[in-house]
Image (tube, helix red, strand yellow):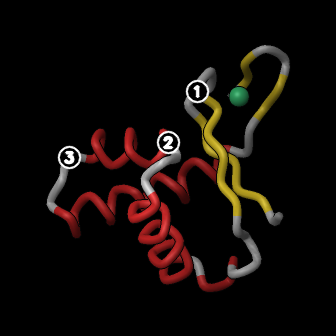
């Protein structure tokens, strides 16, 4: 994806969305609501649950500990802070 001259790793968004989809199933809430609460960034319970689930899904990526959302591209970026 490309917006305003920058790019994102598609794989990151795929990984994040898979976890958010799983969380929506677990909480029996619509995916869009989970996505909105997560990307707003002020829902501590959702953020905590996200990282718990993320490490269950991707134990090989224990080092990753930050996620940001680019609203322009609707893309997630995972990083090590
Ligand atoms: Zn972007």
SS assignment at label 3: loop
In percent of width and height, residue 81 lies at 83, 64
Residue 74 against residue 17 in the figure, above or below = above
> Which residue is tagged 2?
39
Quadrant where the N terminus lies?
top right
Determine which of the numbered discs, if any, sits on residue 30 in the image: 3
**Label 1–label 2 contact, CB within 8 A:** yes
Determine which of the numbered discs, if any, sits on residue 59 in the image: none
The crowd level at tag 3 (other Cα within 10 Å; few <14, some 14-19, many 20+) is few
Determine which of the numbered discs, if any, sits on residue 71 in the image: 1
The crowd level at tag 1 (other Cα within 10 Å; few <14, some 14-19, many 20+) is few
Q: Residue furthest left?
A: 28
- Between the C-alphas of marks 1 and 2, the distance is 9 Å
Q: Residue at x 20, y 64 (%)?
A: 27
The tag earlier along the polypeptide, 1 or 2, is 2
- Please name which of the two marks, 2 or 3, marks the residue nearer to the observer: 2
Left or right of residue 8, residue 28 in this image: left
Looking at the rendering, which quadrant does residue 9 occupy?
top right
Q: Which residue is drawn at 52% across and 46% down?
A: 41
């Amino acid at each position: 994806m490309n917006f305003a001259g920058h790019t994102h790793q598609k794989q990151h968004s795929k990984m994040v969305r898979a976890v958010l989809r799983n969380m929506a199933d677990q909480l029996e809430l619509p995916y869009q609501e989970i996505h909105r609460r997560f990307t707003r960034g002020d829902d501590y319970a959702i953020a905590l649950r996200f990282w718990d689930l993320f490490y269950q899904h991707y134990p090989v990526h224990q080092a990753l500990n930050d996620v940001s959302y680019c609203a322009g591209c609707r893309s997630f970026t995972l990083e090590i802070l």
